[in-house]
Image (spheres, coloured by chain):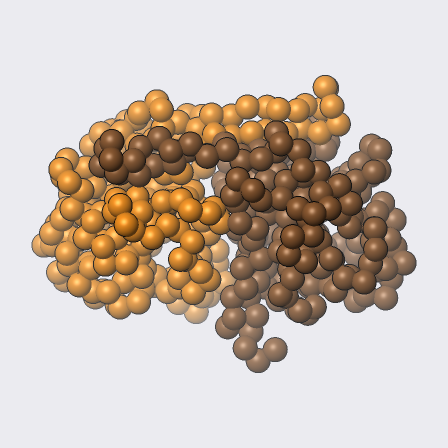
Chain colours: A brown, B orange
Amino acid sequence: MQIHDISMQISPDMPVYKGREEKRPRFKTVATHQDGSAHETEITLNLHTGTHLDAPLHMLAEGSDISYLDGKELIAPCQVFDLTSVEDKITAADLVDLELKPNHYYLLKTRNSVPDFLNKHPEEFIYLAESGAEVIAAANPIGVGIDSLGIERVQPEHPTHKTLLGNGIIIIEGLRLYEIEAGDYKLILAPLKIAGVEGSPARAFLLEEDNQ
Amino acid sequence: MQIHDISMQISPDMPVYKGREEKRPRFKTVATHQDGSAHETEITLNLHTGTHLDAPLHMLAEGSDISYLDGKELIAPCQVFDLTSVEDKITAADLVDLELKPNHYYLLKTRNSVPDFLNKHPEEFIYLAESGAEVIAAANPIGVGIDSLGIERVQPEHPTHKTLLGNGIIIIEGLRLYEIEAGDYKLILAPLKIAGVEGSPARAFLLEEDNQ
């Protein structure tokens, strides 16, 4: 079995949503080997940093927080789709020919995954347009993931988020898919287990059977 | 396959190491549905909060940070040992009769896992004594996990940490094992992918084959 780590590294100079400074993680060394017996760090993170998931509460005032997610939703079959030829946004037309299997995760690989793309183009990431979100919601996935820090932009009222979250579909943002080929995998999605919040940073792995 | 979540929930009133207030996570709501279009939270976490791992840098000035850990070390076979009869500390005598398999994780289930034990007894958690750490290091595991916020206490110079980390053995602290039976599992250990740090909060799952 091959294990692919599809998580973004969290660091002070990582890509952040639209390049906004207030979204950047902050690190503080609170103990060192010189002044004590151990080295310890404290980190301040917007919960939508790096690879992370959004629960319904992020966009819907009465939505669920992340605590409804348990093992069955976090370790599940997954399809990776190659959408690296798409420019600007993924629409219904880009998705209609795909075989979208129900009760899977769909991971959308775009040119956002090209190294340094997000840092160079913080405001022009490829996103999932409302029409694409409708096609995906109709296919009944567990969740949908993308390789930008936001699954949409320039859509007032956030219809992509609301279409997905309103249908109980988990959103994963900030995936790193540059080295991943289109195909079938098992996804391990491991958000921190934080009480009462609208999202969480996560580690994510794809497992690939050797005989595939 | 059964999936067991063995992670501690992160919340303002969670157990923290020795009950110290400065170790407690802090939550800040940075956007709400009333004042904007989304609900967003920022969290400040000591990296040794809840279920977390320690890398060598935590205790050894020249030690590795967590970035040496990749998929093979994070998804691996695991043994859970029932040490709930142990009082105060786990010594070599408590471990000599166990069949410790090389290249596994060993998870030490103690009365720390009893609900509310850690909040009621923040300074008297069951720990792994130096002599126990020597037995474990000799068995060549990938890592060792325990259900307290620290794998040792009242041992000046931290010999348990140094014996384990000095032998390249990952330490996991803050596991929740109350409902887990002794036996063989697969461990999924999913720390956040943070650059250059000595530890990280993690989500952890045990997978159990249905035919076991």
Q: Nearer the viewer, residue B18 or B56?
A: B56
> Which residue appears farthest toward the bottom when viewing the image?
A211
Q: Please give the name of the residue rendered at 64% of the width and 60% of the height, measured from the top-left corner.
A: A177
Q: Nearer the viewer, residue A123 or B144?
A: A123
Vertical relation: B15 (above or below) A120: above
Vertical relation: A39 (above or below) B55: above
Q: Quadrant of the C terminus of chain B?
A: bottom left
Q: Please give the name of the residue rendered at 83% of the width and 55% of the height, measured from the top-left corner.
A: A87
Residue A160 image offset from top left, x and y in percent: 80, 42
> Which residue appears farthest toward the top when viewing the image?
B35
Q: Please give the name of the residue rendered at 30% of the width and 26% of the height, measured from the top-left corner.
A: B19
Q: Please give the name of the residue rendered at 62% of the width and 32% of the height, measured from the top-left corner.
A: A21
Residue B187 image offset from top left, x and y in percent: 41, 58
Q: Nearer the viewer, residue B202 or A42?
A: A42
Residue A77 can be seen, yes or no:
yes
Residue A109 image offset from top left, x and y in percent: 71, 59
Residue A183 image offset from top left, x and y in percent: 68, 69
Vertical relation: A32 (above or below) B92: above
Residue A137 can be seen, yes or no:
no
